[in-house]
Image (cartoon, rainbow, N blue to C red):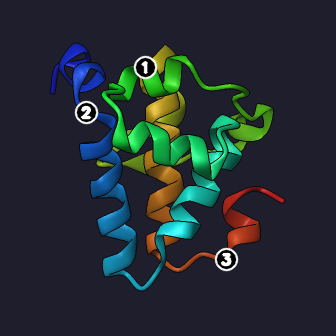
Amino acid sequence: MDCEKLYAMSFAKLYGLLIDKAVRKGRTRAEVDEVTCWLTGYTPEQIEEAMSGDVTYGDFFRLAPAMNPARSLITGKVCGVRVEEQEGLMREIRYLDKLVDELAKGRPMDKIIRA
């Protein structure tokens, strides 16, 4: 997928897909919100506002209040692509994908958020 197309997509749509993936694997939306808050610095209320607004996926990451400095510890593959080899905004998006993948695989929360 073209990066610009991804950046222009609805945050609500793509975040909903991440939530669905986690729920199918026995996790909760609250847990998806928790890893998202850890990564981006948003509060659960701000995530809910973004879900009900017209925020694009790219803008959600561009406007993140405080990207977690420990995010550089997130490594591995998502959809066959190494997270750490991505550049700029796509790397930030892949970080969230990787966190939700770990959540869906049943990894403990303290390990996911690198506590």
Quarter of the image that includes the N terminus: top left
Mark 3 in CB contact with mark 2 (< 8 angstroms): no
Q: In the figure, 114 relative to 30: above or below?
A: above
Which amino acid type is marked by label 2? Ser
Measure the alpha-carbon separation of dots 3 and 2: 29 Å
Q: What percent of the width, then of the height, locates residue 9?
A: 22, 28
- Image point (42%, 85%), residue name: 26
The residue under label 3 is 108
Tell me if label 1 and label 3 are in contact, CB under 8 Å.
Answer: no
Q: Is 86 drawn above or below residue 102 in the view shown?
A: above
Instruction: Name the residue that disc number 1 marks.
Output: 59
Q: For residue 19, which quarter of the picture?
A: bottom left
> Which quadrant holds the C terminus?
bottom right
Q: Secondary structure at mark 3?
A: loop
Residue that numbered label 2 is attached to: 10
Residue type at tag 3: Pro
Residue 86 seen: no
Q: Is residue 95 visible?
A: yes
